[in-house]
Amino acid sequence: MSAICVYCGSSPGTSPVYADSARQLAAELVARGHELVYGGGNVGLMGVIADEVMRLGGRVTGVIPQALMDKEVGHRGLTQLHVVANMHERKALMAELAQGFIAMPGGIGTLEELFEVMTWSQLGFHHKPVGLLNTQGFYDGLIQFLQHTTEQGFLRPAHQAILQASANPAQLLDLLAAYRPVDTRKWLQQSDL
Protein backbone atom coordinates (compact mmCIF):
# COMPACT_ATOMS: atom_id res chain seq x y z
CA MET A 1 0.00 0.00 0.00
CA SER A 2 1.84 3.09 -1.14
CA ALA A 3 -1.08 5.53 -0.80
CA ILE A 4 -3.83 5.46 1.82
CA CYS A 5 -7.06 7.35 1.33
CA VAL A 6 -8.29 8.81 4.61
CA TYR A 7 -11.90 9.92 4.99
CA CYS A 8 -12.51 12.26 7.92
CA GLY A 9 -14.52 15.17 9.20
CA SER A 10 -14.38 18.74 7.97
CA SER A 11 -14.97 19.51 11.66
CA PRO A 12 -12.47 18.88 14.47
CA GLY A 13 -15.15 17.29 16.67
CA THR A 14 -15.85 18.14 20.29
CA SER A 15 -12.73 16.57 21.83
CA PRO A 16 -9.04 17.27 21.16
CA VAL A 17 -8.50 13.49 21.15
CA TYR A 18 -9.73 13.37 17.54
CA ALA A 19 -7.03 15.77 16.32
CA ASP A 20 -4.45 13.91 18.41
CA SER A 21 -5.48 10.66 16.73
CA ALA A 22 -5.22 12.31 13.30
CA ARG A 23 -1.67 13.40 14.11
CA GLN A 24 -0.80 9.87 15.30
CA LEU A 25 -2.15 8.40 12.07
CA ALA A 26 -0.19 10.98 10.08
CA ALA A 27 3.02 9.99 11.89
CA GLU A 28 2.41 6.29 11.19
CA LEU A 29 1.69 6.96 7.52
CA VAL A 30 4.92 8.92 7.10
CA ALA A 31 7.00 6.43 9.12
CA ARG A 32 5.79 3.61 6.85
CA GLY A 33 6.30 5.56 3.64
CA HIS A 34 2.61 5.89 2.77
CA GLU A 35 1.29 8.87 0.87
CA LEU A 36 -1.92 10.46 2.16
CA VAL A 37 -4.83 10.82 -0.25
CA TYR A 38 -7.74 12.79 1.15
CA GLY A 39 -10.51 15.24 0.33
CA GLY A 40 -8.26 18.28 -0.10
CA GLY A 41 -9.69 20.47 2.65
CA ASN A 42 -7.85 22.74 5.06
CA VAL A 43 -10.50 22.56 7.80
CA GLY A 44 -11.33 20.14 10.61
CA LEU A 45 -9.62 16.77 10.87
CA MET A 46 -8.92 16.98 7.13
CA GLY A 47 -6.64 19.95 7.69
CA VAL A 48 -5.06 18.42 10.79
CA ILE A 49 -3.95 15.19 9.13
CA ALA A 50 -2.78 16.91 5.93
CA ASP A 51 -0.79 19.52 7.84
CA GLU A 52 0.86 16.87 10.01
CA VAL A 53 1.84 14.63 7.11
CA MET A 54 3.35 17.64 5.33
CA ARG A 55 5.12 18.81 8.51
CA LEU A 56 6.69 15.37 8.88
CA GLY A 57 7.94 15.40 5.29
CA GLY A 58 5.35 13.08 3.78
CA ARG A 59 3.43 13.39 0.54
CA VAL A 60 -0.21 14.54 0.46
CA THR A 61 -2.57 14.45 -2.50
CA GLY A 62 -5.88 16.23 -2.10
CA VAL A 63 -8.94 15.91 -4.32
CA ILE A 64 -11.57 18.61 -3.99
CA PRO A 65 -14.57 19.74 -6.05
CA GLN A 66 -14.43 23.21 -7.60
CA ALA A 67 -17.43 24.33 -5.53
CA LEU A 68 -15.48 23.75 -2.31
CA MET A 69 -12.38 25.47 -3.71
CA ASP A 70 -14.61 28.45 -4.47
CA LYS A 71 -15.60 28.51 -0.76
CA GLU A 72 -11.88 28.72 0.09
CA VAL A 73 -11.70 25.44 2.00
CA GLY A 74 -9.13 23.89 -0.36
CA HIS A 75 -5.67 23.27 1.10
CA ARG A 76 -3.09 25.15 -0.96
CA GLY A 77 0.01 23.72 0.73
CA LEU A 78 -0.16 20.12 -0.45
CA THR A 79 2.19 18.06 -2.57
CA GLN A 80 -0.56 17.84 -5.16
CA LEU A 81 -4.15 19.13 -5.34
CA HIS A 82 -6.64 17.91 -7.91
CA VAL A 83 -9.64 20.19 -8.44
CA VAL A 84 -12.51 18.22 -9.96
CA ALA A 85 -16.01 19.05 -11.18
CA ASN A 86 -18.11 17.32 -8.52
CA MET A 87 -18.27 14.90 -5.59
CA HIS A 88 -18.62 11.86 -7.85
CA GLU A 89 -15.35 12.67 -9.62
CA ARG A 90 -13.72 13.38 -6.26
CA LYS A 91 -14.59 9.98 -4.81
CA ALA A 92 -13.66 8.11 -7.97
CA LEU A 93 -10.23 9.76 -8.22
CA MET A 94 -9.50 9.27 -4.52
CA ALA A 95 -10.34 5.58 -4.84
CA GLU A 96 -8.20 5.25 -7.97
CA LEU A 97 -5.16 6.88 -6.34
CA ALA A 98 -5.26 4.79 -3.14
CA GLN A 99 -4.31 1.23 -2.31
CA GLY A 100 -6.30 1.26 0.96
CA PHE A 101 -8.92 3.26 2.85
CA ILE A 102 -9.32 4.50 6.42
CA ALA A 103 -12.30 6.31 7.89
CA MET A 104 -11.47 8.50 10.86
CA PRO A 105 -14.25 10.09 12.92
CA GLY A 106 -16.48 12.22 10.74
CA GLY A 107 -20.04 12.94 9.74
CA ILE A 108 -22.43 11.86 7.02
CA GLY A 109 -19.94 12.47 4.20
CA THR A 110 -17.34 10.27 5.88
CA LEU A 111 -19.89 7.50 6.39
CA GLU A 112 -21.08 7.77 2.79
CA GLU A 113 -17.51 7.43 1.49
CA LEU A 114 -16.82 4.51 3.83
CA PHE A 115 -19.93 2.59 2.82
CA GLU A 116 -19.29 3.21 -0.86
CA VAL A 117 -15.80 1.66 -0.79
CA MET A 118 -17.11 -1.21 1.36
CA THR A 119 -19.86 -1.84 -1.20
CA TRP A 120 -17.35 -1.75 -4.05
CA SER A 121 -15.26 -4.33 -2.20
CA GLN A 122 -18.30 -6.51 -1.53
CA LEU A 123 -19.13 -6.45 -5.23
CA GLY A 124 -15.54 -7.21 -6.22
CA PHE A 125 -14.96 -3.84 -7.91
CA HIS A 126 -11.76 -3.49 -5.88
CA HIS A 127 -9.78 -5.66 -3.47
CA LYS A 128 -8.27 -2.92 -1.31
CA PRO A 129 -8.42 -2.98 2.49
CA VAL A 130 -10.91 -0.77 4.34
CA GLY A 131 -10.45 0.32 7.95
CA LEU A 132 -11.99 2.33 10.76
CA LEU A 133 -9.84 4.38 13.09
CA ASN A 134 -12.12 3.85 16.08
CA THR A 135 -10.84 6.73 18.21
CA GLN A 136 -12.29 6.59 21.74
CA GLY A 137 -14.94 4.13 20.55
CA PHE A 138 -16.36 6.63 18.05
CA TYR A 139 -17.45 3.81 15.73
CA ASP A 140 -18.58 1.29 18.37
CA GLY A 141 -22.24 1.87 17.51
CA LEU A 142 -21.57 1.40 13.79
CA ILE A 143 -19.64 -1.83 14.39
CA GLN A 144 -22.50 -3.07 16.56
CA PHE A 145 -25.03 -2.11 13.88
CA LEU A 146 -23.08 -4.01 11.20
CA GLN A 147 -23.06 -7.06 13.49
CA HIS A 148 -26.86 -6.67 13.84
CA THR A 149 -27.16 -6.37 10.04
CA THR A 150 -25.23 -9.63 9.69
CA GLU A 151 -27.32 -11.39 12.34
CA GLN A 152 -30.48 -10.32 10.50
CA GLY A 153 -29.25 -11.78 7.21
CA PHE A 154 -28.62 -8.55 5.30
CA LEU A 155 -24.83 -8.76 5.36
CA ARG A 156 -22.76 -11.91 5.02
CA PRO A 157 -20.13 -12.51 7.71
CA ALA A 158 -17.38 -12.53 5.07
CA HIS A 159 -18.50 -9.07 3.91
CA GLN A 160 -18.69 -7.74 7.45
CA ALA A 161 -15.04 -8.82 7.72
CA ILE A 162 -14.11 -6.43 4.90
CA LEU A 163 -14.04 -3.69 7.52
CA GLN A 164 -11.00 -3.74 9.83
CA ALA A 165 -11.13 -1.60 12.98
CA SER A 166 -8.78 -0.42 15.70
CA ALA A 167 -8.39 2.61 17.94
CA ASN A 168 -4.62 2.41 17.45
CA PRO A 169 -3.28 3.83 14.15
CA ALA A 170 -0.26 1.49 14.04
CA GLN A 171 -2.40 -1.57 14.70
CA LEU A 172 -4.95 -0.48 12.09
CA LEU A 173 -2.23 -0.10 9.44
CA ASP A 174 -0.93 -3.56 10.39
CA LEU A 175 -4.45 -4.98 9.92
CA LEU A 176 -4.77 -3.32 6.51
CA ALA A 177 -1.36 -4.63 5.44
CA ALA A 178 -2.38 -8.18 6.44
CA TYR A 179 -5.85 -7.99 4.83
CA ARG A 180 -6.76 -10.65 2.28
CA PRO A 181 -9.80 -9.92 0.08
CA VAL A 182 -12.96 -11.96 0.48
CA ASP A 183 -14.07 -14.19 -2.37
CA THR A 184 -16.88 -12.35 -4.16
CA ARG A 185 -17.31 -14.70 -7.10
CA LYS A 186 -20.57 -16.13 -5.86
CA TRP A 187 -21.98 -14.27 -2.91
CA LEU A 188 -25.52 -13.85 -4.24
CA GLN A 189 -27.54 -17.07 -4.20
CA GLN A 190 -30.55 -17.68 -6.45
CA SER A 191 -32.63 -18.03 -3.28
CA ASP A 192 -31.68 -14.44 -2.38
CA LEU A 193 -33.46 -13.08 -5.45
Image: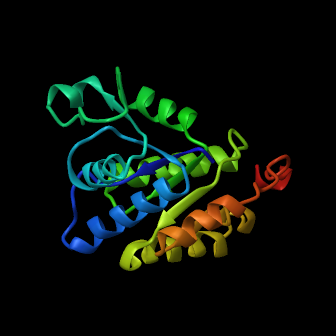
Q: Position of residue 42 (x, y in %)?
A: 22, 43
Residue located farthest toward the front when viewing the structure as drawn = 57
* Image quadrant assignment for residue 120: top right
- Relative to 156, does residue 181 appear above or below in the rendering? above
- Relative to 153, does residue 64 appear above or below in the rendering? above
- Relative to 147, does residue 158 appear above or below in the rendering? above
In the rendered view, how is the structure colored? rainbow
Q: Residue at x 42, y 46 (%)?
A: 58
Residue located farthest toward the left when viewing the structure as drawn = 71
The front one of 123 and 80 is 80
Q: Position of residue 14 (x, y in %)?
A: 18, 70
- In the picture, measured across the screen, residue 63 lies left or right of residue 34, that is left
- Relative to 171, does residue 36 appear above or below in the rendering? above
- Is residue 56 in view? yes
Q: Residue at x 57, y 33 (%)?
A: 96
Q: Residue at x 33, y 59 (%)?
A: 106
The front one of 54 and 44 is 54
The front one of 4 and 15 is 4
The count of marks equals 0
- In the picture, measured across the screen, residue 36 lies left or right of residue 154, that is left
Q: Position of residue 40 (x, y in %)?
A: 32, 37
Residue located farthest toward the top when viewing the structure as drawn = 85
Q: Position of residue 92 (x, y in %)?
A: 50, 31
- Is residue 154 in view? no
* Image quadrant assignment for residue 178: bottom right
